[in-house]
Image (cartoon, rainbow, N blue to C red):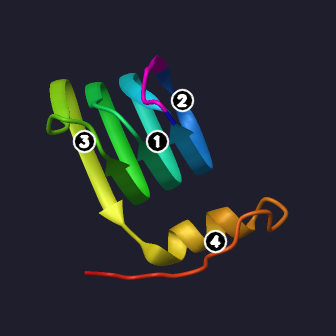
């Protein structure tokens, strides 16, 4: 968890819990169901659709360089996708604001 990574994801679909230890650049069409957790900065260069949640802890706001972002918060979607993969992840506490 040193936030030194610099990652690029070039489109596609996914679900579950995606943890990025650093900066992330999303290119192309990206659809995700679950929780996307970015320790660094998030740059969007394409069309992003997320059902669940997004946490971006970078020093800067989420940057949309090209394209669009649709983020639909759903606590149910996060819990469903996390529990789908063998129950290795457990919800210890939950707080909605």
Mark 3 and mark 2 in contact? Answer it, CB < 8 Å.
no
Which residue is labeled 1 in the image? Answer: 31
Q: Secondary structure at mark 2?
A: strand
Which label sits in the foreground, 1 or 4? 4
Of mark 3 and mark 2, the one earlier in the sequence is 2
Q: Residue at x 43, y 21 (%)?
A: 4
Of mark 2 and mark 4, the one earlier in the sequence is 2
Which label sits in the foreground, 2 or 4? 4
Choose top left, top right, bottom left or bottom right for residue 82: bottom right
Place of residue 17 in the rendered image (x, y in percent of width and height, measured from the top left): 59, 52
Which residue is labeled 2 in the image? Answer: 12
Place of residue 83 in the rendered image (x, y in percent of width and height, measured from the top left): 72, 69
Q: Secondary structure at mark 4?
A: helix
Q: Residue at x 46, y 41 (%)?
A: 31
Of mark 3 and mark 4, the one earlier in the sequence is 3
Farthest residue toward the right?
86
Mark 2 and mark 4 in contact? Answer it, CB < 8 Å.
no
Counting other residues with Cα less than 10 Å from the Cα at mark 2, is it few (<14), some (14-19), or many (20 or more)? Answer: few
Counting other residues with Cα less than 10 Å from the Cα at mark 4, is it few (<14), some (14-19), or many (20 or more)? Answer: some
Residue 19 - label: none
Quote the CA–CA distance across marks 1 and 3: 10 Å
Which residue is labeled 3 in the image? Answer: 69
**Residue range of the region highlighted in magenta in the rendering:** 2-9
Mark 1 and mark 3 in contact? Answer it, CB < 8 Å.
no
Picture quarter with the C terminus = bottom left
Which residue is labeled 4 in the image? Answer: 80
Quote the CA–CA distance across marks 2 and 4: 20 Å
Place of residue 69 in the rendered image (x, y in percent of width and height, measured from the top left): 24, 42
Q: Secondary structure at mark 1?
A: strand
Q: Is residue 89 above or below residue 56?
A: below
Quote the CA–CA distance across marks 3 and 4: 22 Å
């Amino acid at each position: 968890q040193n936030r030194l990574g610099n990652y690029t994801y070039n489109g596609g679909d996914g679900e579950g819990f995606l943890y990025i230890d650093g900066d992330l650049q999303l290119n192309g069409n990206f659809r995700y169901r679950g929780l996307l957790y970015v320790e660094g900065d998030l740059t969007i260069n394409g069309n992003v659709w997320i059902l669940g949640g997004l946490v971006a802890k970078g020093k800067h706001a989420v940057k949309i360089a090209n394209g669009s972002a649709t983020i639909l918060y759903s606590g149910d979607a996060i819990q469903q996708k996390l529990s789908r993969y063998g129950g290795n992840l457990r919800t210890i506490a939950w707080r909605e604001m």
